[in-house]
Each structure stands twice: as C-alpha cells, then as structure tokens.
C-alpha cells in the first residue's frame, strides 16, 4: 500500500512538472511506462460469472502483466462494481454501456510499439462523460476531468529512453472508445450480479415469477434468501427449537384433553364437547408444526434456494390449511364456551347444541375455503410455517371474523366473572372466595390475552411494513460493503422478542387448555372413573383404596355407580346427585370452567347452617335447579 501511494505521488509530481514544461498537452494526458506489462490476452471470466469477456473491444490484446494475480484482482473489482450497478437499475440509463466502460478501464486495450514496449489506451473522456451523464451516481468514482485517466484525444508516453525522438520523445497513444463496439454487440446484455446471500433469478421467466414464492428486490432480478434475513441464524434456530418443543407439548396436552373429555368421559355435556372441540383444534395447530419439523423447517419453508413455499407445494398447502382450520375453530369454540358459561350464569336458554356444532363447522369451513381458493397459503417471508400471507385474505378470513368472535367471548367471560364476583361478595366479606376466581381469570388472561397479543402484533406489523421496506436500501448497502458474505447484514423486521412471543402464543393454546381443564378435578375424576370401571385396573384400585382406608367411604358412594365424587366430603352432593343426575353433570362441567361455582356452592351449603335466610344461597339454588332445562345433550 505504502509503495503504491509513493508511486502515485511521484507520478503526480512528474506529470505536474511535465505539464508546466510543455504546454502542448491539449487533449492529451500523460502516462507512465511500465516495462513489466505487455499486450496479453484476457484470462477470461472467473467462477462462471460473466464479466468482461464479451465487453472488451479486443480481449486478445489487453495491457497486463504476466502475473495473473493482477487480472484476478481487477476482475474482483469489476465484479464489485457490477454488483453496485445492479442496484442502480431504475435510477440510471444505459448501465450496460457503463459496464463496457468499466471493463475498458480495468482491462485497457493495448498498443505494441516498435520499441519492445507495450502501452495502454486510456478510456476517452467522451465515454466517461456519457457514463456519468447517464448515471450521475458514477461521478463519485469517475473523475472525467482527469485527463491522465480520461484523455479527450490520447495519452503521451515519454519514450526518449527507448530511442523515440519525434514529438520531443513523447509517443502518442489514442484513447479507446468502446461506443461502436457496444453498438455492434446488441446481444450482450447488462450483467446483473447479486451480492451474497441474495440470488439471481430471471423474473421475466415464468418459472421464477413472484407468485411462485420469490421475493424480488425490484427493479433488480435479485431475490431474498430463504428464510429472510430478519434475524441471524442462531436466532432462527432458537425459534425453531421453541416451536418444536412447544408444539410437541401442546400436541400431547391436547390429545390428553380429547381423551379425557371426548372419549373417556361418559357425560357428553356442552362443556366437555367444547373442550374436546377446542382441543381438536389445538391438535390441528400443533400438527402443522410437527409435520413441519418432520419434513425439516428449511426443506419445508424453502423448497428451493431463494424460494418460499407456496400453496401448490403440497406440504405447505396442507399444513397451512391444518393450522388455519385449527386456529379458527379454536377461536370459535373458545367463544362458544364463554357463551355457554354466561348462559348458565344468567339462566337463559341457548339454542340446541347441534346447531352450534353445525354453525361452527360451516363457518370454519367457509373461512378455510376462501383463502384456499385464492392461493393465499404460503410460507411467507420470515415465518415458521405456512399460513395465509395475502393481507386481505388474512384480514377477511381470520382477523376480522375471529376478532368479532373473540370480542363476544371476552364480553361473556367478563360478565361471568362479574356475576361470580357479585355472588361471592354477597356471600362473605373475606378474600378467601376471591382466591377461587383464579381459574376463570387465568382462562381469560391466557387464552383471550394470547389472542389479543396476536391481534396487536399483526396490526402493528402491518403498520410498520413501510418502515421495514424503507430499511432495505441499508441492507443492500451493507451487503455491498460487507466482506463477510453478507451474513451479518439484516433487514429491519419485527423485533425478535415480539416475533418470538407471537409464535410462542400461537403454540401455547393446547398447553393453556390443558392447564385449565386437563388438570381440573373433573379430569382426574374422569380418569379415575374409567380406570375404576376397567376390568384390569379395577381390582388394583379397590386394593389401593382399601390400603388407604377410604374404601368404606367410597363403597357407600359407589351404590350411585358414580365414583367420581368419592373424594368429595360434602354429603349434600350425593343427595343431589341421586335426585338429579343430569343437574350434577352440568354442574360438574361448569366447575371445569369456573371452579368457584362448586366451591361457592359448597361454602353456601356450609353457611346455610348458620345463615338460613341468605339470599345468594337462594339464587344459587335457582341456578342449579334451572340447569336441567338447558341440558340438550
Ligand atoms: C504475482 O504477484 C503476487 C503479488 O502481486 C505475488 O504474490 C505472486 O507470487 C506473483 N506470482 C508469480 C507467479 O510471480
Ligand atoms: C478531478 O481531476 C482534476 C484534474 O486532475 C482535479 O483538479 C479535480 O480536483 C478532481 N476532482 C475530484 C472531485 O477529484
Ligand atoms: C523523458 O525521459 C528522459 C529519459 O528518461 C528524460 O531525460 C527526459 O527529461 C524526459 N522528458 C521530459 C519532458 O520529462
Ligand atoms: C430472462 O427470461 C426471458 C424470457 O424467458 C429471456 O428472454 C431473457 O433473456 C432472460 N434474461 C436473462 C438475463 O437470462
């Protein structure tokens, strides 16, 4: 480097002196003779990347040293400048002409003299001026008024040393003008080069159209890598890992819920059905992840380099449809559950459950068919799975209908909590009853809150899309200036934390519903009951119970053939149960939802002894007795 700098200083010094000495340099620049350089042929483009081979006036005679490193070095510089020209498309005219000029600068045409000296032709000033006129951005790297680099007519070389005597020993070499050559090579197109990790695809080729899953950085033919460079690779790995773990757990939890409430439970109450359907929907959602990581995230989301999966990639279409129907039915059944709960509390009659099932199924099918027919399922840019990615399809077939459903559900839940709060407040003044509210509160907070978060994230994301787009030039700048393969360059996207939470919440529903319903006493009882009734386990359980010394209590109960309540102390329950089985079934199911009711009821029953005339007691009794009218299943 130091040597080079010194060299230029000397060169400039010499040229200045020459200029002051002779004043006939009109239209000429001055050049230094380098004895090592000769007229040689161009070494050819490297790495199958077309560069200057077809853009040189005479690629058999270029001014170069025998040592090929120089040419290789020059090719690297040319490649880098072609990359920059690629992103000047749309801002400049005739970049192809600029490429001819650049090749001519780095691989100058050569003139052989009779003095065993070869001399380079410099690019004509007119060419330089035209390049800069067509593309003003080039003026920062091309100084066309420097007549040594871009002489208007030619270059003078002092060959006195070699015996040349004419013109004070200054040998004239005319400048090179590739314009005619350029005009005569109509087949040689502008060469686009995409900086890694971007890839070059031809967007006028039907195979590489945007609707095939390519994201072009228009107006270039460069496509984004897949997955998109929102985050570094280790962050993506974190996300994949989270998705794997959560969806597996969610899948298992949901299967457990389906087994418990859908298959083992003898009682097909509304709540059991709601929980079963909700769990089926979470199974479908987690199935999408499981299939995705079965196939492999990269293979599934990016079937070809630079291409995101689209609906016509079978795996993407199927998992996308699974996820979509899962999440919409999930929302619908969550809403149904809250409406059911509210109807129980307010004692109004709901329409037959059969119609609700029909309604929910039809709505979720319609909501599935619309985006399917619009080919709207794709893996999208920067995502963990296939889902609807066309803005209006996703708004119309998810956010708007599900937003309405969630709003209704949330209102019902809030009203229910309010009712319970009223009851428990009337009941006793201490905080103990408030503790019983935890389950419904958790239910609202976790499921409703998760959905709310998804909403906020989605619309915030939509709002910021322009901002993310605006950051792309910086990303390209980074790629063009980066020496490390562009791995460290990132585009602006949603923050990693926000994105992580988005995926976290969508994959959490199965686990949430397990925690709320699957761990309830009712679920335990269902398992116990079916185990008790199972011929294989029956004898063991009886033995076990007798060992624990509760067999007596239990057997007194078992006459009612419902061992579910064996561990409940309240004798009132058994009385009521014998009186009206269906009432208790309904009642049990409610407690899955709002465990407080049972507890409150029990507390009331305990209180009845002391406070005979308590009004809440009455209201609860009314609630209970009205239940059988609702039992449509
Ligand atoms: C070519 O030049 C480079 C440095 O410019 C040097 O490292 C290399 O050894 C040279 N190669 C030959 C064959 O002389
Ligand atoms: C361009 O070159 C001329 C002549 O060498 C010089 O005077 C001028 O300062 C240069 N301009 C730039 C922007 O470098
Ligand atoms: C040309 O080169 C010769 C020998 O290298 C030198 O003596 C002479 O002064 C040079 N001419 C000019 C005008 O600098
Ligand atoms: C892109 O594809 C079109 C149509 O297939 C073709 O005419 C054109 O030459 C291609 N461009 C490049 C740079 O390959």
Image (spheres, rainbow, N blue to C red):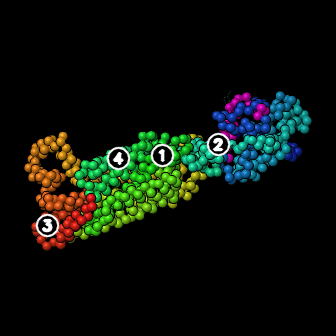
Front residue of 158 and 70: 70
Question: Looking at the image, is mark 2 or mark 3 nearer the viewer?
Answer: 3
Picture mark count: 4
Against 550, is 159 above or below? above
Distance Cα–Cα, label 3 vs label 4? 43 Å
Give the residue at mark 4.
251
Question: Looking at the image, is mark 3 or mark 1 nearer the viewer?
Answer: 1
The local secondary structure at tag 2 comes to loop
Asked whether the beta carbons under mark 3 and mark 4 sit within 8 Å of each other, the answer is: no
Front residue of 271 and 630: 630
Quadrant location of residue 69?
top right
Distance Cα–Cα, label 2 vs label 1? 31 Å
Question: Looking at the image, is mark 4 or mark 2 nearer the viewer?
Answer: 4
Q: Position of residue 268 (x, y in %)?
A: 26, 55
Q: Which region of the structure is painted magenta?
A: 59-85
Query: Neighbour class for label 2 at 10 Å: few (<14), some, many (≥20)?
Result: many
Q: Position of residue 201 (x, y in %)?
A: 62, 43
N-terminal label among 1 and 4: 4
Give the residue at mark 3.
607
Give the residue at mark 1.
316
Question: Looking at the image, is mark 3 or mark 4 nearer the viewer?
Answer: 4
The structure residue drawn at horizontal position 48% and vertical position 59%, both measured from the top left corner, is 395
The local secondary structure at tag 4 comes to helix
Can residue 480 be seen by looking at this rendering?
Answer: no
Distance Cα–Cα, label 3 vs label 1? 59 Å
Distance Cα–Cα, label 4 vs label 2? 46 Å
N-terminal label among 2 and 1: 2
The local secondary structure at tag 3 comes to helix
The structure residue drawn at horizontal position 28% and vertical position 58%, both measured from the top left corner, is 270
Distance Cα–Cα, label 2 vs label 3? 82 Å
Give the residue at mark 2.
193
Front residue of 296 and 15: 296
């Amino acid at each position: 480097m130091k040597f080079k700098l010194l060299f230029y200083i000397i060169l400039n010094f010499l040229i200045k002196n020459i200029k002051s000495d002779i004043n006939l340099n009109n239209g000429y620049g001055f050049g230094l003779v380098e004895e090592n350089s000769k007229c040689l042929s161009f070494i050819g483009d490297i790495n199958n990347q077309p560069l200057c081979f077809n853009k040189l006036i005479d690629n058999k005679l270029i001014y170069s040293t025998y040592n090929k490193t120089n040419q290789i070095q020059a090719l690297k510089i040319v490649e880098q400048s072609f990359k920059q020209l690629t992103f000047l498309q749309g801002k400049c005219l005739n970049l192809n002409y600029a490429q001819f000029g650049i090749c001519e600068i780095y691989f100058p045409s050569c003139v052989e003299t009779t003095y065993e000296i070869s001399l380079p032709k410099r690019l004509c000033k007119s060419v330089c001026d035209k390049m800069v006129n067509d593309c003003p951005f080039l003026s920062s790297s091309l100084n066309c008024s420097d007549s040594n680099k871009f002489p208007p007519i030619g270059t003078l070389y002092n060959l006195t040393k070699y015996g040349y005597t004419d013109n004070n020993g200054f040998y004239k070499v005319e400048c090179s003008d590739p314009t005619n050559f350029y005009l005569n090579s109509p087949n040689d197109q502008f060469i686009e080069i995409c900086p890694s990790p971007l890839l070059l695809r031809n967007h006028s080729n039907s195979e590489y159209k945007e609707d095939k899953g390519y994201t072009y950085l228009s107006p270039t033919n460069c496509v984004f890598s897949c997955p998109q460079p929102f985050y570094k690779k280790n962050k993506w790995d974190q996300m994949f890992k989270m998705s794997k773990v959560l969806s597996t757990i969610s899948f298992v939890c949901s299967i457990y819920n389906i087994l418990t409430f859908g298959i083992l439970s003898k009682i097909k109450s509304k709540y059991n059905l709601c929980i079963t359907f909700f769990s089926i929907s979470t199974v479908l959602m987690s199935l999408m992840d499981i299939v995705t990581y079965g196939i492999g995230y990269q293979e599934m989301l990016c079937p070809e380099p630079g291409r995101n999966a689209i609906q016509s990639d079978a795996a993407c279409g199927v998992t996308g449809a699974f996820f979509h129907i899962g999440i919409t039915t999930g929302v619908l059944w969550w809403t149904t559950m809250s409406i059911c709960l509210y109807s129980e509390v307010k004692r109004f009659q709901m329409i037959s459950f059969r119609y609700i099932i029909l309604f929910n199924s039809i709505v979720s099918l319609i909501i599935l068919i619309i985006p399917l027919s619009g080919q709207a399922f794709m893996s999208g840019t920067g995502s963990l799975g296939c889902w609807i990615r066309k803005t209006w399809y996703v708004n119309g077939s998810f956010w708007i209908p599900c937003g309405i459903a969630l709003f209704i559900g949330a209102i019902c839940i809030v009203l229910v909590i309010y009712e319970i709060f009223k009851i428990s407040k009337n009941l006793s003044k201490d905080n103990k009853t408030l503790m019983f509210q935890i389950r419904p509160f958790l239910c609202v907070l976790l499921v409703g809150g998760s959905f709310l978060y998804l909403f906020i994230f989605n619309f915030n994301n939509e709002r910021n899309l322009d901002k993310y787009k605006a950051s792309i030039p910086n990303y390209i700048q980074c790629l063009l200036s980066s020496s490390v393969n562009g791995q460290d360059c990132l585009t602006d996207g949603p923050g990693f934390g926000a994105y992580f939470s988005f995926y976290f919440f969508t994959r959490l529903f199965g686990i949430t519903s397990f925690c709320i319903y699957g761990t309830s006493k009712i679920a335990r009882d269902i398992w116990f009951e079916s185990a008790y009734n199972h011929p294989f386990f029956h004898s063991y359980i009886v033995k076990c119970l007798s060992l624990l010394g509760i067999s007596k209590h239990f057997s007194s109960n078992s006459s009612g053939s419902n061992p579910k309540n064996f561990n409940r102390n309240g004798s009132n329950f058994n009385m009521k149960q014998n009186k009206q089985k269906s009432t208790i079934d309904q009642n049990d199911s409610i407690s899955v939802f709002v465990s407080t009711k049972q507890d409150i009821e029990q507390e009331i029953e305990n209180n009845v002894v002391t406070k005979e005339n308590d009004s809440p007691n009455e209201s609860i009794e009314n609630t209970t007795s009205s239940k059988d009218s609702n039992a449509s299943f």
